[in-house]
Amino acid sequence: MAKTKPPHFDVDWMICGLRWLPLLLTPALAYLSYLARQEVDLALVLRLTIGGLIFNLIATLLAYAAFFPTAITWVLLILDTALSIGFVVATGFATYPLLIFGLFTVLEATLRFDLMVGVGVAVVIAFPTVLGTILTGADLSLTAFLPPLFGLVALLLVAGSAGSLVSRIKGIVSRARDEELDELRRTNERAKAIYEMASALSATLDYQRAMTAILEISLMGLEELDLPIQESADQKPVGMLLLYGTEGMYVAASRNLKREDEKRLISGQGGIIARVLSAGEAKIIRGLQRDPDLNQFSSLNGRRAAILVPLRVGFDVYGVVLIASSRADAFTDEHKELVSAVCSQAVIALQNAQLYQELRQERDNIIDQHEEARAQLARDLHDGPTQSISAIAMRLNYVKALLHRDPVRARKELDDLETLARRTTREIRTMLFTLRPQILETQGLVAAVEQYANKLQEDAAFEIHLELMDLGDALDINVQTVAFNIIEECMNNVKKHSECQNVWIRLGLKDGLFVAQVEDDGIGFDLQATLDSYERRGSFGLLNIYERAELADGKAEIDSAPDQGTTVTLLVPLTK
């Protein structure tokens, strides 16, 4: 991992780079002064220059290593100040070191610290020049003090200019930092608000509320990104959530949409919507009036730009979200990304709500089927075993009266009662078998149907023919249970209504489908008339067949007509 640079790294690196110039320029000028026969201690100048070059090399290495604590900056400033004074002394208290190395040192002090430190360094460096003028000069007139005073003024001007520049730079940086922090704070607050609403959206299982919330969160986020929402009524952004239905795409939720557009249907098979769904990503679109689907919405008249976001999870496509504005330049990539993020989160909530609705519907169907099964059981018990047991009880009283008067006839009645009791026992066992056939779970549908048919055949007035194919493991237990229940429902109807001579039960696999069929050669019935009269009937056997087939993701087909028998076929796709 790269080492993090300290905040003052750029200043340190700049000062180290600038220091090389006065370190080389000051000795050169000192040598020229020496050639001009001025009092210059070249040996001292050389030693000071070598010392300066060495500590600047060290400082440069420290800056390169990004190791520059505050203590080192003070040490370097003190060394630079001492070097400036040394150059002044070595050149016979000349002024040019003040204007070269002194200016650099004052600039360093001001940039590193502040204006007051720069002014202090300027006074400290200029003081030896003034003092040298007093000690060495025979002429103490104002003219003699002009060079050192000029040098001091130059140092102070540099300190003031640098201080003003640093102050302005700090102000600009501070304002930029404050603006950045404010923007970051607003972004965080916006993200937090959207996250909280999205979290609440994910938690809802209300389908309609989930759809409405998608538009509310999207419009709220766009308003936070400075998209004007509070405009005149005919200029407000229009929001629509379009979902696929059986007849096309319909408006599932909307904002600022005219009433006549709320019930409008479009195909969604061409134009912009089809392209966005095909691409699978949001787009900023223009020219809405040229689209064959969108131009049907009068609410979009005058809307010159829109964001269109597909609602999809994996391969499941639900529809699109559209937000349109009257301004051609209303939307940016930031707007598009925000609405896309909301829709990505919301479509999961939409899926959850849809699954919840389907589960509730399935639960209600199961409850209805259980209630119907209980009612059917009650009817079967009343029409079958209960009647038989009542008959047995009545005939036992009759036998008791015959025991002494006519023993021979009493014996015959007892034989008939035994036959009736055995038949009633078989009926009860058959009913118990159909309620929970254990063989269905242990040996499969074919064995269960065989055993069920054998039990029915014992007392049936018709012949049962079985045409059963080995199904292997092609069916899961859910499909097998549904198929058995439908067969059992069909056989109940056959016993009660068909008056047939033969019944065929068929099980097989064909063209990727599981096929279960019950056919009889009985009197048949008018199928449509029977279905239309169910509101006035107390039994819903045929409807149960249709609904149970849907539980297995299949369908039931019933074919019947008067005097032509009845055929019920269950078709279930074979899927792993």
Image (cartoon, rainbow, N blue to C red):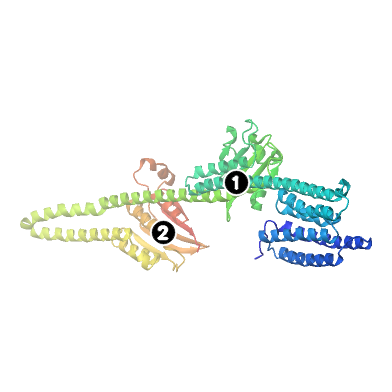
Q: In this view, does 443 lie above or below 203?
A: below
Residue 357 seen in the current view:
yes
Residue 406 % position (x, y): 8, 57
521 left or right, relative to 200: left
From the viewer's side, name the closer residue of 286 and 317: 286
Disc 2 to disc 1: CB gap under 8 Å: no
Residue 376 % position (x, y): 32, 50
Residue 563 seen in the current view:
no
> Mark 2: few, some, or many residues within 10 Å (few <14, many ≥20)?
many
Q: How far apart are marks 2 and 1 (CA)?
A: 62 Å
Please tell me in which quadrant of the rendered image residue 503 appears. Answer: bottom left
From the viewer's side, name the closer residue of 342 and 530: 342
Q: Is residue 142 above or below residue 22?
A: above
At 78% across and 48% down in the image, what residue appears? 156
Secondary structure category for the residue under label 2: helix
Residue 292 % position (x, y): 68, 41
| Mark seen at residue 483 | 2
Amino acid type, mark 2: Ala
